[in-house]
Image (cartoon, rainbow, N blue to C red):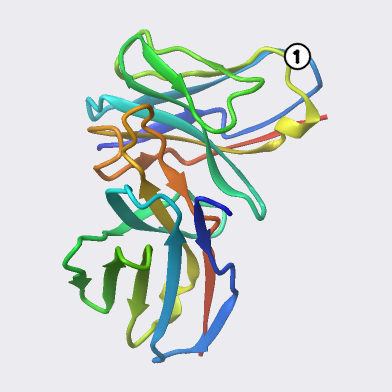
Amino acid sequence: EAQVTQNPRYLITVTGKKLTVTCSQNMNHEYMSWYRQDPGLGLRQIYYSMNVEVTDKGDVPEGYKVSRKEKRNFPLILESPSPNQTSLYFCASSWTEGTDTQYFGPGTRLTVL
Amino acid sequence: RKEVEQDPGPFNVPEGATVAFNCTYSNSASQSFFWYRQDCRKEPKLLMSVYSSGNEDGRFTAQLNRASQYISLLIRDSKLSDSATYLCVVNPLDSSASKIIFGSGTRLSIRP
């Protein structure tokens, strides 16, 4: 089944404790991206990647890192999480950089205390 | 001005009604447009792409007005299952970036 998976689905952590949210897609898509969704602000793009080893900042990259060592995986790293990073995070993938359907993962609800 | 703006709603309409919402965008060079649907606490899913000539898929019609820089979504004969948040998506296809911009969504609630 074609899908985007994210782990964990739910996470409660404390300020400053490094964490990684994994994202994996099995559709051989080139383009992957991370979003956060907050009430009233909608989905905002954090980082995107157009291919392996190619990543770039979206609208709200501060406090986040990503890597794209393999085509299928695009982990999101929070080196030192802070409470303002409490949010719902979605990973997405598509064939190209935005002219195609984006397939979203199920979301990761992160709470930073 | 936000790059992509939507009326947040909520739109509360009776089953069987026709409902329409618009989404305005600020970058006149934008090339790709989409409507996504998002159910509560779920991931967004593509509803339909928006083509220059407009397109229709069953009860749903999407249109693009480049002169006024907005896209629209029309839902006819609304069903209870249409209750969701509808997200407008614009890809500016700017040469310096590949940033996809989501509107903050319009909430639709269909009542029996």
Quarter where residue A53 is shown: top left
- Residue in the foreground of this view, choosing between B10 and A57: A57
Query: Could you tell me which chain the residue with mark 1 belongs to?
Result: A
Quarter where residue B35 is shown: bottom left
Q: Where is residue B75 in the image (x, y as percent from the top left)?
A: 35, 79
Residue at the location (71% across, 31% down)? Answer: A85
Total marks shown come to 1
- Residue in the foreground of this view, choosing between B94 and B91: B94
Quarter where residue B72 is shown: bottom left
Q: Position of residue A17 (x, y in %)?
A: 75, 14
Q: Is B65 located above or below residue A19 in the figure?
A: below
Identify the amino acid type marked 1: Lys
- Residue in the foreground of this view, choosing between B53 and B73: B53
Q: How crowded is mark 1: few (under 14 residues within 10 Å), some or many (20 or more)?
A: few
Residue B36 as seen in the image, left or right of residue A20: left
Residue A105 as seen in the image, left or right of residue B52: right
Q: Name the residue under label 1.
A: A17
Image quadrant containing the N terminus of chain B: bottom right
